[in-house]
Image (cartoon, rainbow, N blue to C red):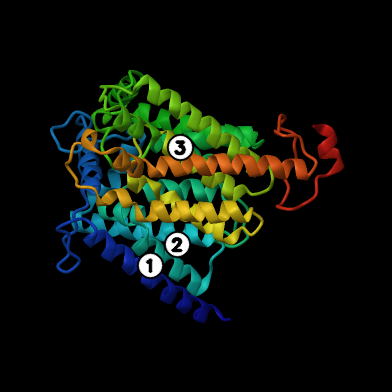
Amino acid sequence: MNAVKRGALTVIYLIPPLFAALYSGATEIADGSFWPWKPVMIDLDVYLRTAQLVLEGKDFYNVEAWLPWLYTPFAALLAVPFAFMSVTVGQIFWLLVNALMLIAIVHRLGFKGWQLSLVSVAAIWLVEPMRVTLGFGQVNLFLMALVAYDLLPGPRVLGDRKRILPQGWLTGIATAIKLTPAIFAVYLFLAGRVKAAIVTFVSFVAATVIGFIVLPAMSIDYWGRLAGGDSGLNAGMKYFTNQSIIGSYIRFTENEPESIPLGGLVLAMIVILVGIVAAVLWHRLGHVSYAVALTAFTGLLASPISWSHHFVWVLVLAAVLITDKGLPDFIRFFGLGYSLWVMYAPFMQFTDGRDEFTYTFGEKIIDGGSMILGMALFALSIGYALVERRRQGLPWLPLTLREQERTPGEPVPARAAADE
């Protein structure tokens, strides 16, 4: 195929997902309109406001506004280009960037040509977290793209060219924007990717230092409040779209604390332990993409606040479960069922504004479905991984960092077994 024809096909395949992102972003939130162009991108409005305040040298954390800026000072610096755009240009630009990020992720997952275009459009229109992320103008898809393109194996947009910078640096940048991707550094270290884990940490520190140098007062404010347990949104932890285990704990106990409750914190630590063990086991068995998806959901379920639209990682989970035929059929079946639950988000049918403490037990179960089914997936993943390790002649757990990585189904090298 000559370059002209290939370029023309690329444009044809890009048009549907780009249009889908613009339309979905403009119409997903109530009162939004595609024509005339009038989206209601409330989170992007925060980014635009913060960018302007950064240029003016003003405090962007303590402002009288409905939605506060919750991210790091480094993230505020990245928002500065929005200050040079009109609201309309900023909205269109951000939606197109997100669409391209999504397309890059789908490409990394192994889809090409018309399949790449079709899967991208389906993800935008059928996956609730994706639609709402675009509608709000949220940063979730951007963060997922940084981590996914850093850690997921698969084809690159620019072909077979080698990495310019080492694995881990994009994950570190994502962590410097929003702290929850730090869970991937833990996964990398325990999975034996020590260099990538160190690069993640160094990248995070370097970006954070830049934030301190350029915005010292705001950095002291942000990190000081965070050290005191104030995330900036503690009062919203019981809200029904918070799908973390801490949110479910608060709704079940009907006790609304000012800070993270001890019981919820203990449960979050259990989620991290179980989720990371599952991810490391499957990484060592050669199913790296599945391990990355498990790590992402570990961070989502353990975070104090994980709004339903944060679960954009369901795209990666579902795609991996469909394409990785080496995973046990029951895990693939159960995981796809869980993916459909997250994609549809049945709890979103609940009445907004109703006091969550008035929910019936059944409603609380439905509202906690993302957490309950997610923990079940972790448990099943651990069980099947342990059985598979024994079948391959490996010890129950990878207790050293020297266990060699293998492709799925590859027999255990004798030396690797001896090293253990």
Does the image show residue 190?
A: yes
Does the image show residue 139?
A: no
Disc 2 packing (10 Å; few <14; some 14–19; many ≥20) = many
**Left or right, 35 with reference to 420:** left
Q: Which residue type does callout 3 highlight?
A: Gly
Q: Nearer the viewer, residue 348 or 420?
A: 348
Q: Which residue type does callout 2 highlight?
A: Ile
- Which residue is tagged 2? 103
Quadrant of image for the N terminus? bottom right
Vertical relation: 121 (above or below) 345? below
Determine whether label 2 and label 3 are within 8 Å by CB: no
- Which residue is tagged 1? 17
Q: Nearer the viewer, residue 207 or 156?
A: 156
Compare marks 3 and 1 and give the one earlier in the sequence: 1
**Left or right, 49 with reference to 79:** left
**Rendered location of residue 11, percent (x, y):** 42, 74
Disc 1 packing (10 Å; few <14; some 14–19; many ≥20) = many
Determine whether label 1 and label 2 are within 8 Å by CB: yes
Residue displayed at 34% across by 55% down? 128
Residue displayed at 44% across by 23% down? 266
